[in-house]
């Protein structure tokens, strides 16, 4: 069984077999940090300049803290349910306004540096410096 699994996780270009002692480390290495990778898209300034009222509120929250689609404060303020907040967040993510990181099974969103820079350039945000 171990030799079969070793063949499955062995890199395609590798000729050296995975040793029994390294087997568990190899399996653990397959899943380590993959859920913590940050997801980034290029900023779409047009999308940033044409936010709806709900999107503007979400961006104002993301400016000061990370949030997840289960954030009760945002859900209550916008009077929406979690799936709708997730849809809006994903739209903002794909527009490059937010980025996302996984923590466990939850996805946390925050304002991207490029969106902050654009908002500062437009005079909407004050520079931190």
Image (tube, rainbow, N blue to C red):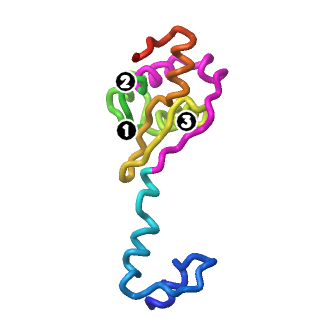
Residue at point 67% right, 21% down?
46
Label whose residue precedes the other's in the sequence (1 or 2): 2
Rendered image quadrant of residue 78:
top left
Q: Position of residue 67 (x, y in %)?
A: 38, 34
Name the residue nearer the viewer: 74 or 106: 106
Residue at point 41% right, 62% down?
32
For residue 71, above or below residue 59: below
Which segment is the magenta one? 37-61
> Label for residue 70?
1
Rendered image quadrant of residue 25:
bottom left
Label whose residue precedes the other's in the sequence (2 or 3): 2
Relative to 123, is 45 on the left or the right?
A: right
For residue 49, above or below residue 58: above
Q: CA distance from mark 1 to mark 2?
A: 17 Å
Q: CA distance from mark 2 to mark 3?
A: 16 Å
Q: Which residue is mark 2?
A: 64
Residue at point 37% right, 49% down?
103
Q: CA distance from mark 3 to mark 1?
A: 16 Å
At mark 3, the secondary structure is: helix
> Label for residue 97?
none
Residue at point 65% right, 27% down?
44
Q: Which residue is mark 3?
A: 93
Tell me whether the residue at label 1 lies in contact with that at label 2, contact meaning CB atoms closer than 8 angstroms: no
- Check residue 43 for magenta coloring: yes
Tell me whether the residue at label 3 lies in contact with that at label 1, contact meaning CB atoms closer than 8 angstroms: no
């Amino acid at each position: 069984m171990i030799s079969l699994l070793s063949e499955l996780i062995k890199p395609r270009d590798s000729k050296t077999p995975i040793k029994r002692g390294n087997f568990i480390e190899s399996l653990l290495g397959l899943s380590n940090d993959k859920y913590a990778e940050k997801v980034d898209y290029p900023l779409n300034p047009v999308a940033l300049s044409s936010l709806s009222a709900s999107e503007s509120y979400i961006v104002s929250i993301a400016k000061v803290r990370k949030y997840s689609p289960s954030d009760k404060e945002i859900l209550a303020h916008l009077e929406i349910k979690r799936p709708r907040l997730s849809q809006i967040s994903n739209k903002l993510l794909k527009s490059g306004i937010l980025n996302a990181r996984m923590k466990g099974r939850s996805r946390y969103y925050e304002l991207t540096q490029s969106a902050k820079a654009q908002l500062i350039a437009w005079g909407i945000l004050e520079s931190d410096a």
